[in-house]
Image: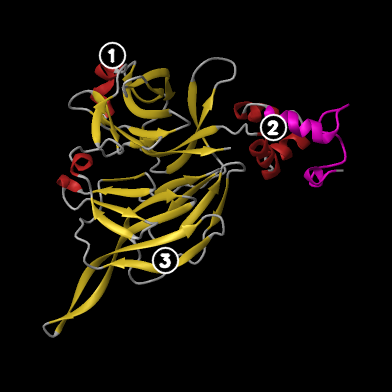
Amino acid sequence: MSEVMEQFSVSPLIPSLPDDVAIDIVARVPRSHYPTLSLVSKNLRKLIASPKLYKRRSFLGITQHRLYAILHNRNTGDFSVYILHRKVSSSGNRLVIVPSLPPLSPRGSYVSVGSKVYVFNDVDALSIDCTSHTVQPISDMPHRTSASPLSSKVANVIDGKVYLIGDSYYLFSYEGGLINAKKKTMIVLDTETQVWEQPVMIKHHLKAGAIWSAAVVMEDKICMRGFRNIHSFVYGPNENTWELMDEVLNSKNWKGGCVVDDVLYYLDCSEKALRAYDPKQSRWSVVNGLEEFLASECAQLKWSKWVKCGEKKMALFFPKKYVGKEVICCAEIALERRQGGEIWGNIESCDVVIKEGLFDMVECVAVTV
C-alpha cells in the first residue's frame, strides 16, 4: 500500500479502484464538495482531513482560493472564524462557522500564507491550518513575555515571511530622570521554518502615529499609511530601507483596500467609486463597470472589507439592510485591464452570506487549498 494510504484502514477508499487512483479522483473534486464527501465513509473522511490530499492537489495544480472571515457576534461577544461555502444544490454563497476553531482575540492581526492563516494577538501568535482546521501555537515569539509586548501591530507577507511591525516601549535617561518612550519594532517570521529571525529591528526615531491607518504590500515593499496623510512610510526588506511614501499614493485614504497583481484598490465612498493605484505609473484611476452597483450599495460600503481571492479577482464583504434585518453580503468581482490601460470590474456574484443574528465583520483572508 502506498505511503499516502498508510494512515487509513485496509478497506479501499472506492471499491474496484486502486487507492492511488481514488486519491487522484478526490483531489480533482472541487473543495466545496468535500463536506458532502466526508459523509460517505470513515476512510474518505480521514482522507479529506489529511494534509497529503492537499499536497496532491497542489502537485496537480488544482488548488482553489477559499475565503475566511472573522466575525464579532454582538449577542455572545465572541470573535469566531467562518468559512465562505458555495452552496452545492443552488447558486449563492454563505458564511458557516468553523466549530473546531476557538474564539479569537478582537485585537488580532491576520495574514495568510498558502493554506495557513497566521494570527498575532497581544502577547502570542498562532497558525490555523485551513486543510484540517486545527490550531498550532507559534513558539518563542520575541517580546511575547517581555514587560513591553508589541501593540498596535500590522502584519504583511513577502516571499513567505511575515513582517510584524508594532509599538513597544523603552526607558531612557533625560535630565536626571527616566522617561518611557515609544519605539517602532519589527520582527520577522519565516513561515517555512516557523522560526523568528534575529535580530529584532528597532526604529527609535521613526515619526509615526500610534498605529497606521492601512498597510499593504506592493512590488515587494510594505506601504504603511499614517493618519491625516502624515508619517507614511515604505519599507523595502531586500534593501532594508525606510522611505517616505510617494505623495500620489499618500494622497488618498485607502484604508481597507487590497492589492491584486501589484495594483492597490480601495473604495472611495465620497465619490462612489472603486479607485486603483498603479505603482508603475504612480497614478490613481477609477475602475469602470461598477457604477450601478456602487451607487446602490455605497451607503454601507464604508464598513466594507476587501480581500484578494484569486488571479485578477477580489471579494467584498459589506453590511446591508435586507428585508428589515441587518445582514452581511459578499460580492465577487473580476478585474480586467483593457487596451489603453483602463481597468474594468465585473460583478460575478453578490449574495447575502449571513442572514440570522447580529454580526460585525472584523477581518477576512484568502487561503490556497
Query: At numbered mark 2, what does the secondary structure look like: helix, strand or loop?
Result: helix
- Find residue 281 and report its horizontal and vertical position in percent: 27, 35
Can I make out residue 302 in this image? yes
The residue segment tinted magenta is: 2-28
Q: In the figure, is residue 310 to the left or right of 267? A: right
- Find residue 234 and report its horizontal and vertical position in percent: 28, 51
Q: CA distance from mark 1 to mark 2?
A: 39 Å
Coloring scheme used: secondary structure
> Considering the image in quadrants, where does the C terminus appear?
top right
The residue beneath circle 1 is 292
Q: In the figure, is residue 238 to the left or right of 293? A: right
- Find residue 338 and report its horizontal and vertical position in percent: 36, 20
The earlier-in-sequence mark between 3 and 2 is 2
Number of marks in the image?
3
- Residue 53, quarter of picture: top right
Q: Which mark is residue 27?
A: 2
Q: Is residue 7 magenta?
A: yes
Q: Is residue 299 above or below residue 199?
A: above
Q: Is residue 311 above or below residue 50?
A: above
Can I make out residue 108 in this image? no
- Find residue 283 and report its horizontal and vertical position in percent: 23, 34
Amino acid type, label 2? Ala
| Label 1 neighbour load within 10 Å: few <14, some 14-19, many 20+ | few
Q: CA distance from mark 1 to mark 3?
A: 48 Å
Query: At numbered mark 3, what does the secondary structure look like: helix, strand or loop?
Result: loop
Residue at (47, 40) in percent of width and height: 81
| Label 2 neighbour load within 10 Å: few <14, some 14-19, many 20+ | many
Residue at (17, 27) in percent of width and height: 270
The residue beneath circle 3 is 144
| Label 3 neighbour load within 10 Å: few <14, some 14-19, many 20+ | some
